[in-house]
Each structure stands twice: as structure tokens, then as C-alpha cells.
Amino acid sequence: MTGEGRPAPALRLHRAKDLAALADGEPFDFVVVGGGGAGAAAAIEANDRGASVLVVEKMATAGGSTEVSGGSLRLVVDAEAAKEHLEHLSGGTTPREVIDAFVEALVALPEWVRAHGGELDPWNDEGVLGRFFPVGGPPQYRHLPLTYSIDARAHVRPERPGRSGGAALWDFLARNLAEREVPVALGARATRLVQAFPERAVTGVEAAVPGGSVHLAAKVAVLLCCGGFSQDAALKLQYFGVDVPAASPPGRATGDGIHMAQDVGADLWHMTAPAGNLGFSAPGLDPALRLQMPDFGFVMVDQLGRRYSCETSLEAHSAARAMMAPDQHHATFVRAPSYLVFDATTLAAGRIGSAGPAHRWSEDNADEVGRGWIRRAEDLATLAGLLGLPAGELQQSVTEYNRAAASGTVDPFGRTPETMRPISGPPFYAMAVSPTLVNTQGGPRRDARGRIVRPDGSPIPGLYGAGELGSIWNRMYPSGGNLAEAMVSGPMAVRHALAAN
């Protein structure tokens, strides 16, 4: 039921085997590749403007990463200041005109939501992201000028009981798709972009169907909204140097849009820019689980037993970057994985791992101790042996931390007294922690109109991008920025494509 007590309208779903019949009909104005937030918002805008649109989604259900996200939308407090601030965050890798277009579209997002029957409520992350390290993190980028300009965050008011955050946002989008009877083809994987020569304009998409493939023509444009490459091991190894585990559902975000866009001459950008937290991964556990520490009696060390950061001031979705720096002397990534070392008081203070579809973490962490995910030892030397760490280095790291915690002073890494408590024992506990991708930012480069461009900056006719695929964000990413981009970049691309047609 919706918030008003009405039955939620059903999406107009098609299966891959039905695509041939759709392809034999009148060509659609837009073919949208990807049935998540960006694709849904784009399809709604296209329909509202009188254009016909087909959404193709390779998975068996729509919703994408949007539905399983936290649902936080970053909003604008001061538009001109926001443009300056985001230009600073981009480090010169995103042109100012692209930033300006994004901010102006984001200013209009609350009205777009209201016009489509939704409401935005202020975002409150208490109890959602965790108190501190590494899930929640501190307020982001407070050291940078004009951070206040994008300080507002919101979420879509739920329309169904028990559906909050990203699920509520998806319900809002799915309802609008259903009310407009936008066709959504599930289990249909786009495999190739079709071009017309000599102009090299993109005129459609080939999609895999049982027994072959089908050509889906697009009279106005193809819009790629099919996510990043969190689940593509080869691309992660190439651009990050290490195959980072992903928090996104298996099968999604496999780099399809990157490969298709490259085939038609697209330039790439922001490929080395992950949005990631710190989490836990084990054989058979997919997706990875994010972690939080319920008490302050802990440190994080690398594979050499050394601390390397102020654990409690890591920046939310940028936290994983601290672990993804290669060690020059050892020619490897000695921080991936790292190890959390803590005491019995911290273990007993609450659940360390987040709940996920592959595993529901026990409230007292006892199941995970029993599985061997959390290691236990009566002394630090034995614990170091279980982890394969140098015993002397681990002992020294904990001793130095305990000395700083007991003194009530800021430690050499900048950790403040109120975030430190001595690690007491025995027993002692430890667990591996890995950089965990929330999503990637890289993909085909796009301009201020959402057009995907070639290395020389010229647009590829008929091809647009939106959302996480080729995102405007680079290494300095503010939480809630990707969902906000998904909500505005798809509709913006549709408007420009129709204006140019």
C-alpha cells in the first residue's frame, strides 16, 4: 500500500524474451540502459515530455544500487558557493560548466520530487550510519572552504511501511514509472551500441535475449545509466591496483557501460576514484559487509603491525582510500587488508558488522568469533601469530596507543582523547578489514549536457550518460552525492537530447 492507503501500481515489466516483439514495433525515442535510480528518473522525464522510452535492465529485478543504498540525497544550501566548493573537490578534473549544470539541476530537485508526488524530509543518520569509524565518519571536508554550501541532506518520505532510505526512494521512482506505464525489460543485458556511419551516431542498442540478440532502435538517443565497475575484478585491478571487495549486489555494476562506450570511441574519466568505506569480506560472502566499532578501545594496523591513520576521523565514503596506497618499500598493498585490534569491552559493546543479504551479523559478535572471522587470543604475541603480523610491531603499536589514551592527550596520528580508551586484556581480539567499494565513479566522460564525448571533447551523437557511470565526482566525494547525481543527471540529459533533436 502507498502512504495514502492505495495499492502501489505495478511496473510494466517485460522479460528478455519479449524484447523481439518490442523491437518490431515503432522505435522508441529513448532507450535507457539501466533500471536503477538514474535510468528511472530519466525515463520519467522523457515520458513527461511526450517522448516514448524503453528501460532495459540486465538483472531480474529493477532498482539497482539505488534501492539498496542509504537513500541520502545531498542538496544545495548556497548555489554559487556550492559551485566553488565542488570545483575545489574535483581538483580540476571536472570542468566548471559541468559542475555549474549539476548544481543548477540539484537546486531544482526538491520541486521535481514534489511535482511527482513525493516529499523530502531532512536526513538524520543517527542509527543509520553508525556512531563513528568506519561506517559513519565525521562531518565531511570541514577543513575545506564553503563546505556548508552542500550541507543539507534529505531522503524521500516512505510511501510504504517498512521501506526507508534507498528502498523508499526506489518506491517513489517505481510508482512514477508504473503510473506512466513505462515499459521496463528485465533480464535484458545491453551488449553493444549500434552506430550509423559515416556520422558515427549511436542509433540503438543490441541486447541479449534467449537464443541470440535483438536490435533496439532509438530515434533520439541512447542513455547509459548502467552503473560502474564495482564487480569487475579486472577493471578494479587495473585502475585501483587491488581487487577491492564490493558492497553492491553481485551481478550489478560489472562495467558494461564502460566497455560499450569505449567501443564507440568514448573518452574515460575518474577511473581511479572509488567511493568506499571499510568493511569485511570472506570466502562466500558477497557483497562485503561494512563495519562499525561500538566502543573506542581499538586501533587499526597494517600487515606490518603498524598504525597509519587517525581511525576515528576517516572521511565516510572516502575512508577506503587510506588503505589503497601501495607501500613503496614492499611493492605491495600492505594496508589491504588491515586489521582491527580491540578488547573484550569493545567486543561486548555492540554489533561490529552491518547486516547484509549474505549474512546477518550477530548482535553480540559471538557467531563471528565462532566462524573465525574475529580472532581471539590471550596475548598480543599469539594474536599476531594468528594474523601473520610481526609480534613486536603489533605490541609496540598497542603500547604506544594505550600510553596516549591514558595520558589524555592527542596521539601522534591526531586521534583526540574523547575517541580513545586503552585496549585492555586479556583476551584480545582482531579481524581483517578491507577497503570496500560503495561504488565507483569512473566511466565515459560527459559534458554539461550529459553527452558522452570522445577524447577530443566532441560529443558522440545520440549517446548520453547519467548516474554513477562516468560520474562527475572524483577522489573527493561527499556522501549522498551519487544519489543526488542519479536523480538530476538523467532528466537533464533527456531535456538536452530533446532540445537538440
Image (cartoon, helix red, strand yellow):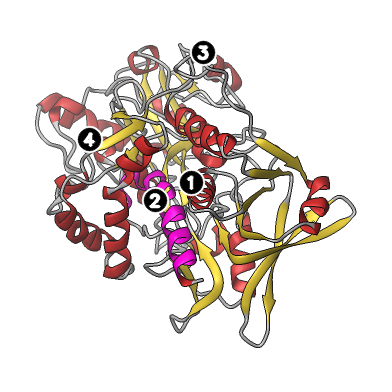
497 part of magenta stretch: yes
Looking at the rendered structure, the kind of residue marked 1 is: Ala
Residue 339 % position (x, y): 43, 36
Looking at the rendered structure, the kind of residue marked 3 is: Ala
Residue 463 % position (x, y): 55, 68
Question: Marks 1 and 2, Cα distance to the nearest angstrom?
Answer: 8 Å
Is residue 320 toward the left or the right of residue 437 in the image?
A: left
Residue 46 to residue 451: above or below? above
Kind of element beneath mark 3: helix
Question: Marks 2 and 4, Cα distance to the nearest angstrom?
Answer: 49 Å
Question: Marks 3 and 1, Cα distance to the nearest angstrom?
Answer: 43 Å
Tell me which segment is drawn in magenta: 477-499
Is residue 320 toward the left or the right of residue 410 in the image?
A: right
Question: Marks 1 and 4, Cα distance to the nearest angstrom?
Answer: 52 Å
Q: Which residue is mark 1?
A: 41
* Screen quadrant of the N terminus: top right
- For label 3, the crowd category at 10 Å Cα-Cα, with few meaning under 14, some 14 to 19 and many 20 or more, is some
Residue drawn at x 33%, y 66% as measured from the top left: 98
Please indicate, yes or no, whether residue 455 appears anywhere in the rendered image.
yes
Looking at the rendered structure, the kind of residue marked 4 is: Glu
- For label 4, the crowd category at 10 Å Cα-Cα, with few meaning under 14, some 14 to 19 and many 20 or more, is few
Number of numbered discs overlaid on the protein picture: 4
Does the residue at mark 2 contact the one at mark 4 (Cβ under 8 Å)?
A: no
Kindly identify which numbered label has been placed on residue 488.
2
